[in-house]
Image: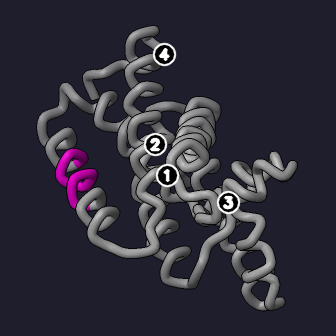
Amino acid sequence: MRQRREPATIALIIINCIVFAVTYLTGLNQAIMTLGLARYTFMHGYFWTPVTAIFVHASPMHLAMNMVSLWFMGRLMEPVLGRNRFLLVYFGTALCGDALCLLLAPTMSLSVGASGAIFGLIGAAIIVFRQNRNVFMQLMFWAGINLVFTFWGSGIAWQAHVGGLLGGLLIGWQLTRTHAVSSYY
């Protein structure tokens, strides 16, 4: 039997789905979303919101799109980075996206979901796989298409997406620069 090489990815998907099910089915989704990453709540002492916002999703479609993306990016990146580095990239880039939201988003705006972290995984993968032309081009295309939808759609926290992507590029560069991971996959 093949040993699972993406236990962190599976755990993150399960946690996201459980949080969504509990909040959505109990009617707490609206209440919890108000504690999502809103500048107002963060500035009024809710300092945990950058972390909790990663696990809260606005709708079943929002959750589904993020979890499918996490599944594909996790299966690509977790075996390459290992569980601990994968989680570092995931949470580090999510916080980069949240930081850009706190800096640039309107005061009462809301940013929830795993998409900042997913954009971060895409950014890190672009750096890690830059020597592999086929994978690199696919990642660039995927990043480009997702950025188009980010700015084309309404109600999307572009700051989280761009912040996550930039954070992923920087963290991926640091990982390859320090030889924590090779850049020739």
- Is disc 4 in contact with disc 2, using a CB cutoff of under 8 Å? no
Label 4 and label 1: CA atoms lie apart by 26 Å
Question: x, y (%) of residue 56?
Answer: 68, 68
Quick one: SS at disc 3? loop
Residue receiving disc 3: 38
Dot 4 crowding, Cα within 10 Å, few <14, some 14–19, many 20+ = few
Q: Is residue 17 left or right of residue 31?
A: left
In 3D space, how far apart are the residues under numbered discs 1 and 2 (Cα atoms)?
A: 5 Å
Q: Is residue 122 above or below residue 10?
A: above
- The percent position of residue 57, horizontal first and vertical second, equals 62, 72
Tell me the CA gap for discs 3 and 4: 35 Å
Specify which label sits upstream in the sequence, 3 or 4: 3
Gap between marks 4 and 2 measured at Cα: 23 Å
Is 143 magenta? The answer is yes
Q: Position of residue 148 (x, y in %)?
A: 24, 62
Residue located beneath label 2 in the image? 163
Question: For the residues marked 3 and 1, what is the alpha-carbon distance in whole angstroms?
Answer: 12 Å
Residue located beneath label 4 in the image: 180
The residue shown at (49%, 82%) is 61
